Image (cartoon, rainbow, N blue to C red):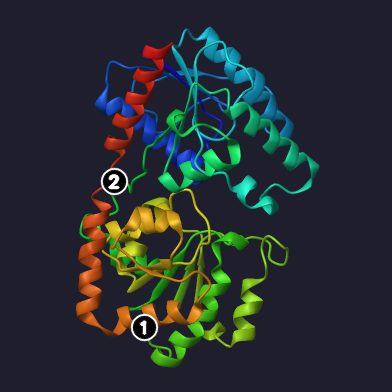
Amino acid sequence: MHICFNGWFWDQPNTGSGQYLRHLLRGLRRIAPDLKLTLVLPPGVTSADDLPADVNLITTTGSRGNLGKVIFEQQTFPRMAGRSGADIAHVPYWGTPLSSPIPLITSILDVIPRVLPQYAPGWRGRLYTALVSGAARGSAHVITISDAAKADIVRVLDIPAEHITTTYLAADEGYNPRLGAEHDEAVRAKYDLPDRYVLYLGGFDVRKRVDQLLLAYTYVQQAEGDEVPLVIAGREPAWGSPMFPDLRAYAAELGIGDNLRWIGYVEEAEKPAIYRMASVFVFPTMYEGFCLPVVEAMACGTPVVANDIPVLAEVVGEGAFLTKTGDERAMAGAIIALLEQDPLRETQITRGLSQATRYSWRKTARETLAVYNRVLEGK
């Protein structure tokens, strides 16, 4: 069997689509060494770091702007997939071409632009969303990353449920309570982290509801004083737009600025240490396709507090402390309880570790390979 992949996000390993593509290729190579794999690289990318052995590369020309992306998705990739002699073309993100010379599989990680229209602003955003929405219906099969995402795809894209398969994501092997822990203190020194801290690690767009966490932390600060600061990790955007409200200004307005540590971008290799050393990890998002940071934190043995949204209830089970969405007092109460009640904390750590073991990239690869086989059998 020969699979050809759209590699638009290969050189963007810090994005969800980039991580998914890299882990999936590595997982497929481990479980099916005889599987032939081809990766079509986007314009301007002539080599692929960290690529599994024996993966064929196809380089392309063109631009990397918005129009260039559409041309790559709609014309270049399907043409190259057909020329490669592959049996299946796999687009590992929501960028489906309208037509393909070979059977097409699309991985739709979420449908945020349809569920939250502010994520597809302007006529260009709406036009692109309409294009890929219609094109996705022509896929031989759709893969998604949670049953909650599947339900949204059925509802907003009108794709039959039997044409969609859920394959969960997973934390990398480095996310572990002990593996690599000998480097934790060096990471602590690099980021000047305190002995105890509450952690947020992620993006800052409005969907992430970091404002809710900041408001919740006002109550944590009243209970804990300056003993347990809030560490906020992630590359900061240009503040002050509808998509990225000024959270630094909001924290100052709430009077918690002195107890916040903004540590900025964290290297992928250092994230497990950041999670491991945290007393509590909080993820107040209002919508996700899967919510990988929560699984990563659980896999590191860190208790988790998050909003009770469908995908998190599905993914974490009893492995995290879920509170009513938008209820900053309940979120604060959960954080304080985990900081102060050792039996509760140990219970949640154990539950989180157990839940995280349900997910592995090897399992994701096996289930994806099964989809390839079904598509070929039905061809």
Residue 78, given in percent of the width and then of the height, sits at 58, 17
Q: Is residue 242 above or below residue 140?
A: below
Side of 5 where 37 appears, left or right: left
Residue 41, given in percent of the width and then of the height, sits at 54, 25
Assign the C terminus to one quadrant of the image: top left
Give the labeled residue for mark 1: 336
Using the image as rendered, state which of residue 262 and residue 293 is in the foreground.
293
Residue drawn 70% across and 47% down? 120
Under circle 1, the secondary element is helix
Q: CA distance from mark 2 to mark 1?
A: 29 Å
Mark 2 near mark 1, Cβ–Cβ under 8 Å?
Answer: no
Residue drawn 51% across and 74% down? 213
Residue drawn 48% across and 48% down? 289
For badge 1, the amino acid type reads Ile
Give the labeled residue for mark 2: 359
Work out whether mark 2 precedes mark 1 in sequence or the reverse, and give the earlier one: 1
